[in-house]
Image: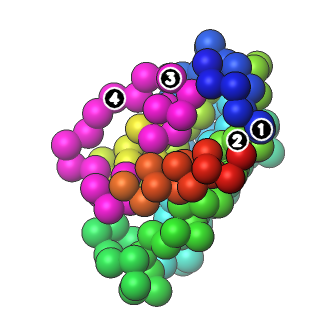
Amino acid sequence: MRNIEGMQENEILDVEYMSRDDFEKINQNPPANSICISISTRYDRFRPVELSPKWDNTLRLTFDAHVPTNDEHGFTDELADSVVKFALDNIKPTTEKLIVHCGEGRVRSPAIAIVIGYMYYAPANDCKSMDKEVFWQMKRAFKRKMRNV
């Protein structure tokens, strides 16, 4: 495991991404020692996900899929940096699961989950339809963080 400030060894971490529907099935009784990242779009403000207080920690993000970063609804460098910071601050040696969800679980959430899995040497299934721009922004955010350590 990398020995990086804020990053602690974790050999049990499992990283999953899923749809909102699948997430809502486990949200009220999340797996033990788990954290989640909940991704919504600008349209979800009318029906937000109510996150259970049983999660060890949560992060809410709002951005749309396949939107340029210069668009107000796109995934920005600031969002990518906040996700990397959240992961580094909240994935502990005892964290067993990180669940990332978005509407369909096929575009936004896999892009984030795969990079966080990479950060911790935790497997996350590849997804051909993931938002490639989000994926590369996450990779760049992680590299920025590593340069500043």
Amino acid type, label 1: Gly
| Residue position marked by numbered label 4 in the rendering | 125
Q: Which mark is residue 6?
A: 1
Q: Earlier in the sequence, mark 2 or mark 3?
A: 2
Q: What's the residue type where badge 2 is placed?
A: Leu
Q: Position of residue 63 (x, y in %)?
A: 46, 71
Is 45 one of the magenta-colored residues? no
Q: Can the viewer see residue 84? A: no
- The colour scheme is rainbow
What amino acid type should be assigned to the residue bearing mark 4?
Asn
* Mark 3 surroundings: few (<14), some (14-19) or many (≥20) residues within 10 A: many
- N-term-proximal mark, 3 vs 1: 1
Tell me the number on the disc at residue 88: 2
Q: Residues within 10 Å of mark 2 (few under 14, many from 20)?
A: many
Q: Which residues are magenta?
A: 115-135
Q: Secondary structure at mark 2?
A: helix
The residue that disc 3 covers is 122
Q: Are marks 1 and 2 in contact (CB under 8 Å)?
A: yes
Q: Are marks 1 and 4 in contact (CB under 8 Å)?
A: no
Residue 78, quarter of the rendered image: bottom right
